[in-house]
Image (spheres, helix red, strand yellow):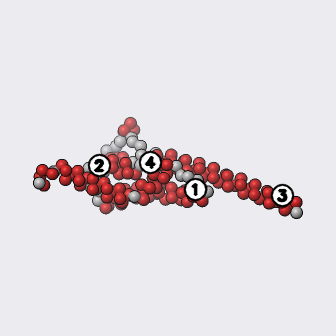
């Protein structure tokens, strides 16, 4: 009877240690991924580098998907093919973030703000593009209001 009790305590202790180790590892992976997301080269820089080589001092940093979209297509109506290219650019990161989120959820670990914002923005790219296009069209209409009146 006493050996069963000791065995049960050992199993519980080992289980707790494994859970703690997995939680720590997931937290570290979450922090690592947050840092990688922050260092993503913005899509706007990729577009500009096609036209000219960027100097190291002018290199910008990723803030979020919505800001990158706004900077990439400033004053430009986004076509469906451009939207598709923009989405493909972030798809690999999204898959990595999404798999990490599933693991974090299992262990009830809150993802970092960077990861949460990235996931939210990626899921809303279509609506962000739509809102952007509406703002650009409204800006063009406002600019040429006298002509249309």
Residue 56 placement (x, y as % from top left): 39, 38
Mark with earlier residue (2, 3): 3
Q: CA distance from mark 4 to mark 1?
A: 22 Å
Q: Give the answer, above or below, for where 56 lies relative to 89.
A: above
Check residue 6 in the rendering and tell me which mark sits there, or answer none.
3
Q: Is residue 129 left or right of residue 40?
A: left
Quarter of the picture containing the N terminus is bottom right
**Nearest to N terminus: mark 3 or mark 4:** 3
* Residue at the spot 33% in from the left edge and 49% down from the top edge: 70
Residue 142 vs residue 70, the one in the foreground:
142
Query: Mark 2 sits on what residue?
Result: 74
* Mark with earlier residue (2, 4): 4
The residue tagged 4 is: 40
Give me the C-alpha separation between circle 1 and circle 2: 36 Å
Q: Are marks 2 and 3 in contact (CB under 8 Å)?
A: no
Query: At which x and y percent is residue 83?
Result: 34, 58
Which element is circle 2 on? loop
Quadrant position of the C terminus in the picture: bottom left
Residue 67: mark in rendering: none
- Choose mark 1 or mark 2, whichever is in front: 1
Foreground disc of the pair 4, 1? 1
x and y percentages locating residue 75 in the rendered image? 26, 50
Assess disc 4: are there few (<14), some (14-19) or many (≥20) residues with their C-alpha within 10 Å of its C-alpha: some
């Amino acid at each position: 009877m006493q050996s069963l009790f000791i065995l049960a305590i050992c199993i519980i202790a080992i289980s707790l240690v494994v859970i703690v180790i997995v939680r720590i590892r997931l937290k570290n992976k979450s922090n690592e991924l947050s840092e990688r997301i922050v260092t993503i080269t913005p899509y706007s820089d990729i577009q500009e580098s096609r036209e000219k080589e960027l100097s190291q001092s002018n290199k910008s940093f990723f803030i979020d998907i919505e800001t990158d979209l706004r900077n990439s297509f400033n004053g430009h109506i986004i076509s469906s093919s451009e939207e598709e290219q923009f989405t493909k650019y972030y798809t690999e990161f999204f898959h990595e973030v999404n798999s990490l989120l599933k693991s974090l959820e299992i262990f009830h670990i809150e993802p970092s703000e960077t990861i949460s914002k990235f996931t939210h923005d990626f899921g809303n790219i279509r609506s962000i593009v739509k809102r952007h296009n509406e703002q650009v069209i409204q800006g063009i209409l406002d600019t040429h209001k006298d002509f249309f009146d």
